[in-house]
Amino acid sequence: MKKSSLYLPSLLAATLVSLCGAQAYAQVIASGSRIRVIQAGAALPTEGSLVAMSSDSISLHLGMSSTLLSMPMDSVRAVDLSRGRFTSFGTAARDGAIGLVVGVGVVALGGKLFCAHSGGDYCGLDAALLAVPFGVVGLVSGVAIARRHKTEHWKRVYDRPATALLIGPAPRGGFAVGLSIPFGSRAAQP
């Protein structure tokens, strides 16, 4: 069998799988789910609980209230689904490192001030050994602070395709113009 004869069925199968996956993915949003709607002209996103979503409109309860807001899908640029509020590992590591530096820094600064005034025996290994428990206390405190600071994480479930006009240089000299126009149902877009 020729290589080109396998290309078309493979391309068709991949297209069907991706379209089915996109439609199933758009249907995953259950009523009552916490969502964030980003409108085309708005500066801030609108957050609330999903009431209904169709190919032409979306309805949600704003925040924790019972105020119902409906808007056409033509004005929606993107819809994000809440994955929950939690502390990311990066935030905990960053705050723990800050706490560690502060703990060790307090001992270093205190040791420097104490050694400058007393000139005693405390200035050597004892100050370095004292930095370890202070550093550990700072590390644990930083991680504890980070664990109390939870942020909401979002997953993009709908992104309206944008029409784009691309103009630029061609690879082998000259000039190139490209136009991108979205087709298909907006509710089926991932």
Image: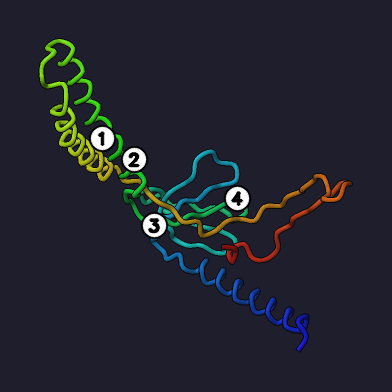
- Disc 2 is placed on an element classified as helix
Q: Which of the two labelled residues, at mark 1 and mark 2, occupies the earlier sequence position?
A: 2
| Amino acid type for the residue under numbered disc 4 | Ser
Closer to viewer: mark 1 or mark 3: 1
- Disc 4 is placed on an element classified as helix
Q: Identify the residue at image location x=60%, y=50%.
A: 75
Q: Is residue 7 left or right of residue 33?
A: right
Kindly check if marks 4 and 3 are in contact, taking CB atoms under 8 A apart as contact.
Answer: no
- Report, in whole angstroms, how far the alpha carbon at label 1 lies from the one at label 3: 28 Å
| Amino acid type for the residue under numbered disc 3 | Arg
- Report, in whole angstroms, how far the alpha carbon at label 4 lies from the one at label 1: 45 Å
Q: Position of residue 171 (x, y in %)?
A: 82, 50
Mark 3 surroundings: few (<14), some (14-19) or many (≥20) residues within 10 A: few
Q: Position of residue 190 (x, y in %)?
A: 56, 62
Residue at the spot of label 3: 83
Residue at the spot of label 2: 94
Residue at the spot of label 1: 99
Closer to viewer: mark 4 or mark 3: 3
Quadrant where the N terminus lies? bottom right
